[in-house]
Image: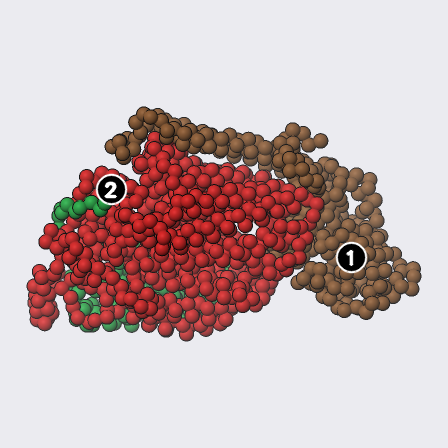
Chain colours: A brown, B red, C green
Amino acid sequence: MMGRRGAVLSLPLLLAGCDYQTYQSIFSDASTEVHDFNILFVIFLIVCAIMYALVIGFLIAAIVRRSRTGPADVVEEGRHHQSNPAMRTGLIGWTALVGTGLMALAIASFFGDRSMANAAANEKLSVNVTGKQWWWDITYNSADASKMVRTANELHLPVDVPVHIYLKSDDVIHSFWVPSLAGKQDLIPGRDNDITLVPRKIGIYRGQCAEFCGADHAKMALIVNVDSYADFLKWWHHQLESAPAPTSPLTQAGYNFVTTRQCSSCHAIAGTPANGTVGPDLTHLASRRSIAAGAMPMSEGNLYGWVADPQSLKPGNHMPTIGLEPDQLHAVVAYLETLK
Amino acid sequence: MTPPDSIPQRIRAQDERLARERGTIARDGPDLRGAELEARLDRTWRRTPGIIGWLATVDHKEIGRRYIITALIFLALGGVLALAMRVQLARPDSALISPQRYNELFTMHGSTMMFLFAVPVMEGVAVYIIPLMVGTRSTTFPRLNAFSYFMYLFGGVMLWVAFLLNIGPDVGWFAYTPLSGPEFSPGKRADVWAQMITFTEVSALAAAVVLICTILKARAPGMTLARMPLFAWAMLVQAVMIVFAMPAVALCSSMLISDRLVGTNFYNAAEHGDALLWQHLFWFFGHPEVYIIFIPATGFVSVITETFCRRPVFAHAVVVLALISTGILAFGLWVHHMFATGLPRVGYSFYTSASMTVAIPTGLQIFCWLATIWDGRPRFQVPMLYVVAFIITFVIGGLTGVIIAAVPLDLELHDTYFIVAHFHYVLIGGAVFPLLGILTYWYPKITGRMMSETLGKISFWMVFLGFQLAFFPMHFSGLLGMPRRVYTYPAGLGLELPNLLSTIGAFIVALAVVIFVVNGIVSLYRGMIAPPNPWGAATLEWATTSPPPPYNFAHIPVVESNTPLWDVDGEMPVVTGLRVDEKETLLTTVVAAVPDLREPIPEASLWPFIASVAVGIVFVASIFSPWALAFGVVPCAIAIAAWFWPKEMKRHPEPVIS
Amino acid sequence: MIPAPRFTDSVAELPTTKFGPSSLTWWGIIGFMIIEGAFFGLAFAAYFYLMGHEQGWPPEGRQAPNLLWGTLFTIVILLSEIPNSMVKKAARQRDVPTIRRLMPVIIGVGVVLLIIRGFEFNNLNCRWTDDAYSSIIWAILVLHTTHILTDWGDTVVLWALMMTDLGWEGRRLVDTDENSMYWRYVWLLWIPVYLLIYWVPRL
C-alpha cells in the first residue's frame, strides 16, 4: 500500500481516528511525482526533527543548568564579561552542522526535482487546460483535428501514461493543482505554462484552483478520473460522439429552448446549433460527476437548482440567473439529463 | 570664510552681539544640576497641554506610545476578523459568511496585520526606546517622526472606513494582478488597498530615516558601534532594509493605481505588460518585509535574554554579523514565493539555496541566546517565558520554511494551509511572542508601574498553548489538500477536525490577548510603582526615571562598556555644557561616538499634522481622480514649506528650530 | 537607583553647525537619496523586464522618442551645475551675496527645464495608454519630473530664507550646501533616465 513512509505521515491522522478520503491529498500516493514528494518530504521531516530536537535539548539543558551551585558568568558575580570557552567550539560546530544539514537537504531537493521531471519523459498524451473564472476549459489534443475533444471541469487520464498538460489563462491567474497526482502550476494570462505527470493508480481524484482568482475561487474544483487504458479510449470515443437527438416532447422542448435562447450564446453542444465557446461545453454534461466545477455533485435535483438560479449557488459567476418558467425548467433539465 | 570686509556692517554687528550673548547661556554641569536643573529642563522640554499640544508634540516617547497603542488596536481589529474567518471554517460547507465577504475578511486581516500592526508596532517600540537606549534627549528629525505617525494613522483609518462602508478591498493582502487590475476588479476596492500602501510606506520610510540618523549620529559619547546594544543594531539593520524594500511596493502599487486610473498597461498582457511584473516587485518588497518584522523581534529577544540571564548575549559580534547578513540575504529570496509560476527551473535552484542559507545566521543567533542561558543564571519572569516560547515556536516555523524552500515540496504545499501554518509560526512565534515579552519588560519604563506577574503568566500560557492548538493542525489541513483563501471546504477530506481545533485555539489566543490587554490597563492604576531599574538591567534607558522626564536624561551619559549600568560603580560619567533653556542634544561621530556637534531639537509644531492632513487628502482624492495629484501639490507644498519656515525671523546666539 | 553623575568634559565649545557628514541633515538627505535611488533602480529594472518580453524595442510600429528635447534638457541641466557649484562654494565661505544672486539663476533654469520637460512629454511619440513600453517610459519620465519639481520647490523656499538676515546663519548655509548636493543628484539620476528613454530604444 503506502509503505512505511506513508505510514509515518498519516500516523497522526489515524490517531485522530477520523474517517477521511485521500483523493485530494498526497496521502493517496497516486503518481510517481507524489510518491517522490512523499519520500523527499519524509527525508526533510527527519532532518528537521533532528535539528529541532537539538535546539530543544540545548534549551532544556540550559534551563536545568541554572540550579547548579557552581559559579556563573553573571553580573552578580562580576563575571558577566566572561563566557564558557567551550561555547565557542560549540558555536562553530553548530554552524557546521546547520550548514551541512541544509546542504544535504538542498541536494536531496535537487535530486528529487530531477526525478520528478524525468518521470514524465516521452509523454504520449497532450491536453490543453485553460483557466477561466471559475471553471476549467479542457481540450484533448490530437494530430487529427476531428479527434479533438472539448470538455470542462473533468479530466480523464489513462494510468501509467505520461500526460503533458498545457496551461493557459483567459482572465486572471489560476493554479492547476491535483494534489494526489502532482504539484501545482499556475495558469497565467500571457504566459504558456505546462505540467507533466504520470498517474499510477486507477481512481477518482479531486483538485482545486490554488491561486486566489476572485469571488468563486473556493468553488473551482477539478475532477480527475484515472482509468485503465482501454476505459480511457472508450471514454475518448464516447466524447467524440455528438449529443443524442431528443426523443420525447419534453426533451424536444428543452432542446428547442437550449439551442434558440440564451444558453446557446455561451454553451456548445456537438451536433446541435448551439456553439457558444464562452462557457463550458455541455455535449456530455450528464456524464460528469459534478456541476459548475465542483460546486455540487451531478444529480437531477442539483441540475434543477443550478439551471434555475446559478447565482445563488455560486454568487458572482458568469452564468446569469435568467428566470425560467417552471415548464421551461423541466424541459431544459430533462434535455440536459440526456447529454450523457 | 569670506573676508570680514564683504560682510555688511549690520550683520557684523549682529554677529558680535550674538557672540557676547552666547557667553551668558545657561548650561548643565557642576554649577547647574540636581532639582534646579531638572526643573528648568522640564520647562524647556515639556509640551503644552491640550489638544493643540497633543497634535503638535515632537516628544518621541509620546509618539512611540501612540504608535504602540494604535498598532495594538489594529491587532485587535485584525484578530476579530480572524475569529470571524475561523468561525466560518469551523465546519465544512458552511454558509455563515458569503464568499465575497470572506474575501474581504482575509484581505483585511492580512493587510491589517502586516501593514497596520506588525511593522508599526516595531517602529513604535523603537521610536520610544532607542533615544533612551543610546543615551540622547530625542530622536533626530522629531517632526518627521510626528508626520510618520499621522500618515500611518490616516492610512489605517482610510482602509477600515472603506471596509465598514463596504468598499473595502477583496483581492488579498498581496493583490495579484490581473485580478486586482481594472478589468477584473472594477470599482474602488483595490484602489483603497493600493493607497493604504502609499500611506504606510511613506510612514515607514520616514520612521526609518529617523531611526537610522538617531542610531548613527545621536549616540552617547563612548558608545562606539562595538558597544552599541543589540537592539539598536537590529533597528539599524531593519531601518536600512525598509529603505531598500519599501520603494518596491510603493512602485508596484503606484503602477497598479496607474493601470486602474489612467489606463497604463504595466500588468496587462494584452498590451505587452506582464502579470508577473507585479509579483516580482511585490515580493522583492514582501520577503524583506517579513524580516523587517522579525529582526526587531530578535532585538527584543537579545534585550530580554541579557537582562534575565544576568549577562550580555554570548558572542555579541557574531549576533551583529548575523543580523547584518540576514538583512542582506533577505533581499535574495523573493522568487521562492513564485515557484509555481513557471519560471526557469535552473533559476529556482538559486532561490532554494538562498532561502536555506538565510537559516544559518538565524540559527547562529539561536545558538547565542541558548549559550547565554547556559552561561548565565536565568530568571523566568514573564518576559523570559516569552523568550522560551519564542525559541520553541519560531524554530518550528523556521524548519517548515526550510521544507518549503525545496521546489518539489513547495509545489505541493504552496498556497495551502501548510503555508498559513508556517508563516504564523514564524510571525507569531518569531515576532509576537517577543513583542508581548518586551511590552511587559518595558511597561514599567513607559508607565512607571509593573504589570501583574500573575495575569502575565496566565495570558502567557494561554497564548502559547492556544497558538499551538490553533496553528499546528493547519500543517495537516494543508497536507490533506486544503488550499488558501477559500471560504469553505467540502466534507469528507479529513479537514473537519484540524479546522475545528484551529478555531478553538484561535479563541483561546483571543482570550489570552484580552487578558494581556486587561493586565496592561489595570496595571496602569493598580500596578506596583516601578523604580528606575526594576529588572536590574544594563542599558541606558534604565538610567533615568520610570517614566522618563521629557528631556530623558539630566546630563548626557558617557559610555565605557556595552553594559553601562552593570559597570558603573554608583557614579555615571556624564558630559556637561548643553543648553538648558533651549532644546539641545549632542551629536557624535558615527563609529567611535566622539562628541562632534551640538544640535538644536525642533520645537513642537502643528505643521507635521497639517502636512499629513494635506497629503492624506491628496492620496485619498487620487483614488477617484488623477487631477487630485496635480491640484493637491500646491497645498502640500505650502504645508511643507511652512513646516520648515522658522517661526520667528530673528537670529539667536545659538540655533533654535522653532 | 539612578547613579549619581560624575562630571567629565564640557561640550559647550563644540560647534552647532558643520558642513558635510557631521551635519545631521546631510544624513537625512542621503537617506532620502537612497530611497529615491531604490525607487528609480526598481523602475529601471521594470523597464528592462518589460523590454525582455519584446522582440523589438520600441515594439513594432512605434517610434522612439524625438532626440531633440531630451538632449536639450540634458545640456541645460548639465550646464546648471555651474551656478550650482558656485552656490555650494559660496555657502561654505559664508558668501551670502553670491548665493542671493545665483540662486534665482538656478530657479530660472529650473523653470526652463520644466518647460522643456513639457515638450519632452509631447514628443515621446506615444501615449501612456498605448502599451507597456509607453507606460514605462512615461512612468520614468514622470518620476524624474517629480524629482525636479520637489527640488525646485525646495530651492525657491530656501532662496526666500537666504534673502532675509537668517541667511547669514550657519544652519542656512549648511542647508544651501546640502541643497546643492541634492541638485547634483537630480541631474546625475537624469543621465540613466535619459539613456533609457532616448537611447536604449535606438540600439
| Disc 2 chain ID | B
Q: Which residue is more in the foreground, B233 or B51? A: B51
Q: Give the SS element for disc 2.
A: helix
Q: In the image, which disc is placed on residue B565?
A: 2
Q: Are marks 1 and 2 in contact (CB under 8 Å)?
A: no
Q: Can you name the residue that lies furthest to the right here? A: A248
Amino acid type, residue under disc 2 in the picture: Leu
**In this view of the protein, can residue A37 be seen by the observer?**
yes
Disc 1 marks which amino acid? Asn
Q: Nearer the viewer, residue B607 or C170?
A: B607
* Residue C16 versus residue A108 in the image, above or below: below
Task: Please count the marks in the image.
Answer: 2
CA distance for labels 1 and 2: 75 Å
Disc 1 secondary structure class: helix
Whether residue C91 can be seen here? no
- Please tell me which residue is depicted at 60% across the width and 41% down the height of the picture: B476
A152, B20: nearer the viewer: B20
Q: Is residue A127 left or right of residue C111?
A: right
Q: What is the quadrant of residue A267 in the picture?
A: bottom right
Image height check: is B458 above or below B168? above
Q: Is residue B437 above or below residue B52?
A: above
Direction front: furthest residue: B526
Q: Give the left or right position of residue A295, taking residue B151 as reference.
A: right
The x and y percentages for residue B138 are 26, 56
- Per the image, the residue denoted by label 1 is A302
Residue drawn at x 58%, y 39% is B409
Q: Is residue C7 left or right of residue A125?
A: left
Q: Position of residue A23 (x, y in %)?
A: 70, 42
Vertical arrangement, residue B50 with respect to residue A19, above or below: below
Residue nearest the viewer, comparing B556 with A116: B556
